[in-house]
Image: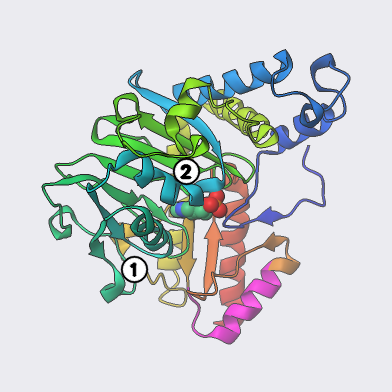
Amino acid sequence: MITSTRVHNFCAGPCTLPVPVLEEVRDEFLDFDGTGMSIIEASHRAAAYDAVHMEALADFRSLAAIPDDFTVLFIGGGASLQFAQVPMNLLAEGQTAGYLNTGAWGRKALGDAMKVASVYEAWSGADGSFMRMPTTDEIEVRSDARYLHVTTNETIGGIRLPELPAADIPLVSDMSSDFLSRGIDWDVHDLVYGGAQKNLGPAGLAIVVVRRDRLSTHGRNLASYLDYATHDANDSMANTPPMFAIYVMGKVLRWMKAEGGLGEFERRAAERASLVYGAIDGSDGWYTSPVDEASRSHMNIVFRLPDEDLEKRFVAEAGDAGMVNLKGHRSVGGIRASVYNAMPVASVEVLVDFMGSFRAANG
Ligand SMILES: *Cc1c(COP(=O)(O)O)cnc(C)c1O
């Protein structure tokens, strides 16, 4: 049951989670599975937590159809730690990799990788104000590059790669903001990672899926936590894992399986996106999408109104009507509606109705 106090939360992250998951968490919060204690009070070595942890690993693997030659790691520190941990683990001394500078997150990944390895910018969207993704022939793929790093969905700019680049080198994808909302081609990847807090659960947790034969090839003297091999050898329990985040994500994954799996969530994502872009495109230019049509994100839908004053009022009046967190990122402005896996289509319909009535009143 959705209580009347719950809003339509269009936050870019952390974000709305499935109500049945939140209710389950609430119901078992004081006494998890007959243990007489909360899951956050339990030892991570206890049988009760072990079952939760191993089920989450297995459910992630089955939902994303991950082949046996990849390992799934749960690592604290969010996606941002991976900006450094990926090159530390995949690049030996002297090796290089290309990075797509597609916006705020691609740029951060590149910036941190540069601090630990000699990587290069394989394409920059700066000329086009980061309003589109590159085509394969625009990307500089050096023959000695070990991988090409891509951000499949730029959360702030509101653009996504409609298709992965057909590079002749393995891809490394940051899928933080479209994880398990679209299929993943494992054949072309060495590694896929993402923070949990957009599509999958609470913040503070990253899921890293890496080809097993890439482990321990870095030849570096890494601190044990920074070495993927440590996490792989211990089922991601080498140290105390972010237990609560994993527990909640496990429930989200179970919910996703029950709702129909990845294909169903890809379909819902396309449906939500087409509702909002349809409202933009059908407004005779009153609402405008600043991004290239082919690169339009299915997760973070950015749009503008005729002027900033109207945008402020749009955000305020939407808030009064129970729709929150619609203000665009400070670096981009305008409106941003983030519509991740757990966002009900019905909430998007409420937004689309509001867009229509707001335009009618102010257009
Ligand atoms: C949110 C986000 C990150 C950063 O995630 P943290 O868990 O906050 O470190 C990285 N990449 C993308 C694409 C994101 O959307």
Who is closer to the viewer here, 258 or 141? Answer: 141
Residues packed near mark 1 inside 10 Å, few (<14), some (14 to 19) or many (20 plus): many
User: In the rendered image, which quarter contains the C terminus?
Assistant: bottom right
Q: In the rendered image, which residue does mark 1 sit on?
A: 131
Residue nearest the viewer, comparing 247 with 204: 204
**How many numbered dots are placed on residues in this image?**
2
Rendering quarter of residue 37: top right
Taking depth in this image into account, of 49 and 136 the one nearest to the observer is 49
Q: CA distance from mark 2 to mark 1?
A: 22 Å
**Residue 84 visible in image:** yes
Residue at the image point whose x is 45% and y is 67% from the top: 280
> Quick check: 40 left or right of 63?
right
Q: Residue at x 41, y 69 (%)?
A: 289
Disc sitting over residue 194 in the figure:
2
Query: Regarding mark 1 in the picture, which secondary structure is present there?
Result: loop
Question: Is the CB atom of the residue marked by disc 1 within 8 angstroms of ligand 1's nearest atom?
Answer: no
Q: Name, please, the residue furthest toward the front.
A: 221
Q: Which residues are magenta?
A: 304-318
Residue shown at 54% from the left, 56% from the top: 338
| Amino acid identity at mark 2 | Gly
Marks 2 & 1, CB-CB < 8 Å contact: no
Q: Is residue 263 visible?
A: no
- For marks 2 and 1, the one nearer the N-term is 1
Q: Which mark identifies residue 184?
A: none
In the rendered image, residue 14, in percent from the top left (x then y), is placed at 62, 51
Residue at position x 47%, y 63% in the image: 156
Callout 2 secondary element:
strand
**Left or right for 190, reference 181:** left
Q: Main secondary structure of the magenta part?
A: helix
Q: Is residue 131 magenta?
A: no
Which of label 2 and label 1 is nearer to you?
2
